[in-house]
Amino acid sequence: MSEIQLLPQVRDFLQRDHAHFINGRYCASACATRIPTINPANGQAIARVTGADDSAATTAVRQAFTSNWAETAPYQRGQTINRLTDLIEANGEELAQLETLCLGKSIHLPRMFEVGQSTMAGSLARVTLILGGINAAVLLPDADLGMAVAGLIQTGYVHQDQVCAAPERIYAHRSHQEETLAKIAAALQGINLSSTLGGSVQFGRRSSTRSRNWSVSD
C-alpha cells in the first residue's frame, strides 16, 4: 500500500506559528523559547511551539472551574463532552496524521477508537473499551500458537510499547516453548518496516531518540 498523503489542512497546520490556546483563544507567550516538534521517522522538525508559560493557563482553569464548570449540571457536562467527542471523530483523519507525525506511531494506532466503533456495529450493548495491560503473557499447553503469536507481535512490537498494552514477559509451556520462539522469530522477520505514514507499515519509528535509546539499552 502506498504512503498516505497528508491532508491539506494538516500541511497548513504544520506551517503555522503555534501559540498557546488559553481560555478559548490563542495567546502570545512571554517566553521567547521556541521548542521544535520532531518527526521521529526522519528526525526533522515539523513545527515549533512556544515554550512553557503556564501562569495564564492556570488562572484560566481555576476561573473556569469556580465560575462555570463547578455549577454545571451533570447532564450538561455530558453534553459538552459528547460534543467534544463528535468534533474529534469528525476530524479523525487530520488528528491521526498529526499524532502520527508527532509520535512516530503507525497510522492505525492513533485511530484505535475505530476498533471500538466496529466492535459496537449493530449492537446496543453497553461496553467499555480498555486499551491497557502490561502483565505477562502466559501460553498454556493448549494455546493456539498462531493466534497467540499474532497478538504478541501486535502488542509487544507493533505498538512499540508506546501504549500500555505490551506484555513485559512471555511464559510459554515447555511442551511448545521452542515452537513458540520459532514462530515469534518468523513473525518478526516478516514485519513491514516503513515510513510512519505508510499505509501498510507495522513498525515505524520510536516517538523520540530518548525512547529509542531506552529500548535499545533495556
Image (spheres, grey):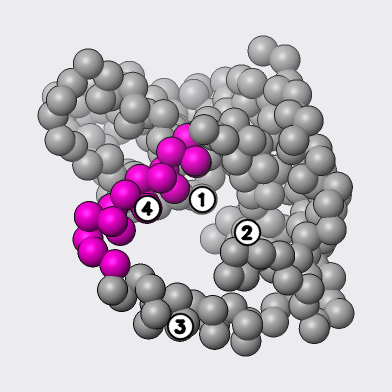
Residue on which disc 3 sits:
62
Residue on which disc 1 sits:
162
Q: Report crowding for label 1: few under 14, some 14 to 19, many 20 or more residues within 10 A (C-alpha).
A: some
Q: Choose the circle earlier in sequence order: 1 or 4.
A: 4
Residue on which disc 2 sits:
211
Residue 154: tell me if it is visible. Answer: yes
Give the quarter of the image for residue 178. top left
Mark in the foreground, 1 or 4: 4
Q: Is mark 3 on a helix, strand or loop?
A: helix
Checking the image for residue 8, the label placed there is none
Tag 3 near tag 2, CB within 8 Å: no
Q: Residue at x 22, y 55 (%)?
A: 75
Label the magenta part by its dominant secondary structure. Answer: helix
User: Who is closer to the viewer here, 11 or 147?
Assistant: 11
Q: Point out the stretch of residues depicted in magenta.
A: 72-89
Gap between marks 3 and 4, in whole Å?
Answer: 18 Å
Question: Along the horizontal axis of the image, is 134 left or right of 120?
Answer: right
Q: Choose the circle earlier in sequence order: 3 or 4.
A: 3
**Residue 77 drawn in magenta:** yes
Q: What element carries label 2?
A: helix
What amino acid type is highlighted by mark number 4?
Thr
Q: Which residue is drawn at 41% across and 45% down?
A: 83
Gap between marks 1 and 4, in whole Å?
Answer: 29 Å
Gap between marks 2 and 1, in whole Å?
Answer: 9 Å
Q: What element carries label 4?
A: helix
Q: Residue at x 86, y 47 (%)?
A: 15
Mark in the foreground, 1 or 3: 3
